[in-house]
Image (tube, helix red, strand yellow):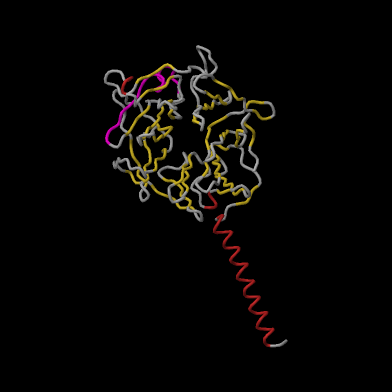
Amino acid sequence: MKPNLLLFLSILTLLTSCNGQTSKNNYIDQFTIGNTVKELGSNIMVVFQDSKNDYWFGSWETGVYKYDGKILINFSTKHGLLNNRIDEIKEDKLGNIYFRSANATSAISKYNGNTFTTLTAVPSENWKLESTDMWFKYSYGNTGKVYRYDGITLFELLLPNPPDLTNPFDVYSIYKDRKGNIWFGTNPVGVCRYDGKSFEWITEEDVTEFRNEGANGVRSITEDKHGDFWFNTEYRYGVYDSATLNGNKFFTRHESIGGLDGKKDSDLDEYLSTVRDNNDNLWFVTYRNGVWKYDGTELTQYVVQDNLKDITLFSIYKDNNGDLWLGTHENGAYKFNGTTFEKFTP
């Protein structure tokens, strides 16, 4: 073989090898070492869409799934995820994704697009409220704790008890309102607003549960188009309309829709999750009675079934396009098609 030809083939072989290696590394960099799968797990409780429009589906048993519109990747503890139960998914301004598990104490998983790292919480009394802070729920167990992450340190903070109530409690929901204040929905001591300086509590009977010895808790907080707050109960609360405030309270409780089914003694006066859509309708998710839409005047029920059987629901989520998604206990994820909720198949 001629020397020049031999040199050419050697260089070609080297380039081919390098290109193949680069492609392999690019695949690993993009998807870490997650497993490519064809379908979601059954218990998809949390749905989230990031700033790149990728979807994340949090399971309670099989970790988290990422779907970019073409490929479905499953990440679990064997890939660096802290726990295979995912209760909460959030994203920071840099595009890092965070995963919290109720089974993992004092730690959160952070995904930077390539690898998972674990953020370990630091017990602190450093209560602050910065616009860039991220807030997470803590593990259950009547701890009364929450996390605040400032981009550097994950602080483990203890909420003060409301006046005259010393019951141990958990934080079930966290919500940032239109004024930038943080709200904590608890079980069973009501709702707390933190404005960066002080804590103010709502402990009316419908948010404390003591009247029925129940344990539903304030699982969802949202504001309607009028600025009133809904705490997954039969009442709504006016807070920032000073003309309606009563006495020395910072809120006014108003009668609202009551039971979703219109019955006086309804079992549907408490729900699991709420979201406000792009048309200012409120959507309520119940455990076994489907989804209900409230347009400010009328309620409309949407039955959610699998093989003609009602399924158990957990959460509702509005994505970047305004589309609505459901997380379920045993039936994967569902998406609203404008008429009904249908099971999502990647």
Q: Which residues are magenta?
A: 197-214
Name the residue at the front extreme.
279
Return the x and y of residue 53 as percentages of the image width and height.
54, 46
For image coordinates 59% across by 49% down, the residue present is: 73
Name the residue at the top extreme.
264
Name the residue at the right extreme.
1
> Is 180 located above or below residue 115 in the figure?
above
Return the x and y of residue 244 as percentages of the image width and height.
33, 19
Q: Give the left or right position of residue 279, taking residue 254 as reference.
A: right
Query: Is residue 103 or residue 92 the one in the foreground?
Result: 92
Query: Is residue 258 or residue 33 the one in the foreground?
Result: 258
Residue 138 sits in quarter? top left
Q: How many marks?
A: 0
Return the x and y of residue 168 as percentages of the image width and height.
36, 29
Which quadrant of the rendered structure holds the N terminus? Answer: bottom right
Name the residue at the bottom extreme.
2
For image coordinates 53% across by 33% down, the residue present is: 316
Evaluate whether residue 63 shows in this view: no
Evaluate whether residue 145 shows in this view: yes
Return the x and y of residue 224 as percentages of the image width and height.
44, 27
> Is 171 located above or below residue 62 in the figure?
above
Say if the magenta span includes residue 269. Answer: no
Q: Give the left or right position of residue 285, taking residue 252 as reference.
A: right
Which quadrant of the rendered structure holds the C terminus? Answer: top right
